Image (cartoon, rainbow, N blue to C red):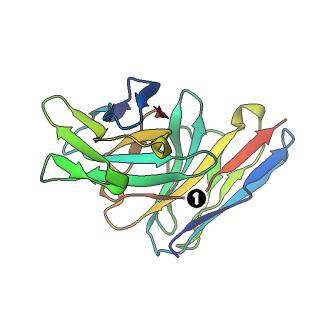
């Protein structure tokens, strides 16, 4: 069975500092990995995905993620956090006929 | 504008009273799914559909039904709602490639069963 782990319920970072939101996964076969963001009272919005190719994937709003096959990780990163980045972030993995989401990590950017 | 539309956005109902949450997408997507979001549990898939007349159970299907008679619509039916179905529900769709393709989500339906 496929699964996703987001080990941190919440990540706090000062505005302007780099941020990392962690994600590890387990899936049979090639992993299809995604990050989504959810703002209050909104649906999830796609940020970026890894299907194949370069291990560093660039996405929306200056976010990027690094795929590490040996560590089965797909951490979300941003060089300089903004207050407006504060939201709930979900990692997801695509497997046979379904996509499995993590429990989410709340990112709080402190002014 | 590409979108997934859910209705209603908010719903309060009583135990046992049948209800339907509608979902419609305008992107001609083949794959549609329903999720529920609960604190500490993240998003869990209820049902999914890979095409018209093709549906299958997700991780938490008990107490729910779906149908896919048209490509654009994928309603979620609660025949006899119970308080443990109080949750935030999301419909999503994605195109060819299914699990390799990003999903578009609706705005959510907050359901309270009393």
Q: Position of residue A79 (x, y in %)?
A: 28, 41
Instruction: Check disc 1: other Cα within 10 Å, few if <14, some if 14-19, many if 20+.
Output: many
Q: Is residue A3 above or below residue A93?
A: above
Tell me what residue is drawn at x 31 percent, y 39 percent: A76
Q: Chain of mark 1?
A: B
Q: Position of residue A84 (x, y in %)?
A: 49, 46
Q: Is residue B21 above or below residue A105?
A: below
Q: Position of residue A38 (x, y in %)?
A: 51, 46
Q: Position of residue A82 (x, y in %)?
A: 42, 43
Q: Which residue is mark 1?
A: B106
Tell me what residue is drawn at x 32 percent, y 41 percent: A80
The answer to whether residue B58 of the structure is visible from this angle is no
The answer to whether residue A44 of the structure is visible from this angle is yes
| Quadrant where the C terminus of chain B is found in the figure | top right
Q: Nearer the viewer, residue A31 or A35?
A: A35
Tell me what residue is drawn at x 21 percent, y 41 percent: A66
Q: Nearer the viewer, residue A52 or B71?
A: A52
Tell me what residue is drawn at x 52 percent, y 73 percent: B71
Check disc 1 and report its element: helix, strand or loop.
loop
């Amino acid at each position: 069975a496929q699964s996703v782990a987001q080990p941190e319920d919440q990540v706090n970072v000062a505005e302007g500092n780099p941020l990392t939101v962690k994600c590890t996964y387990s899936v049979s076969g090639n992993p299809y990995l995604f990050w989504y963001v959810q703002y209050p009272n909104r649906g999830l919005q796609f940020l970026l995905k890894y299907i194949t190719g370069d291990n560093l994937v660039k996405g929306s709003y200056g976010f990027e993620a690094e795929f590490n096959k040996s560590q089965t990780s797909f951490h979300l990163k941003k060089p300089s956090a903004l207050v407006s980045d504060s939201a709930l972030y979900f990692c997801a993995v695509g497997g046979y006929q379904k996509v499995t989401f993590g429990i989410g990590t709340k990112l709080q950017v402190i002014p | 504008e590409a979108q997934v539309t859910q209705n209603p956005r908010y719903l309060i109902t009583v135990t046992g009273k049948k209800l339907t949450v509608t979902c419609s997408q305008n992107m001609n997507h083949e794959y549609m799914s329903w999720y529920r979001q609960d604190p500490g549990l993240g998003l869990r898939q209820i049902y999914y559909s890979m095409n018209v007349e093709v549906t299958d159970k997700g991780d938490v299907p008990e107490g729910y039904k779906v149908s896919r008679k048209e490509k654009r619509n994928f309603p979620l039916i609660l025949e006899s709602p119970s308080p443990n179905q109080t949750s935030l529900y999301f419909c999503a769709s994605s195109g060819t490639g299914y699990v390799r393709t990003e999903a578009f989500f609706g705005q959510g339906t907050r359901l309270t069963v009393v």
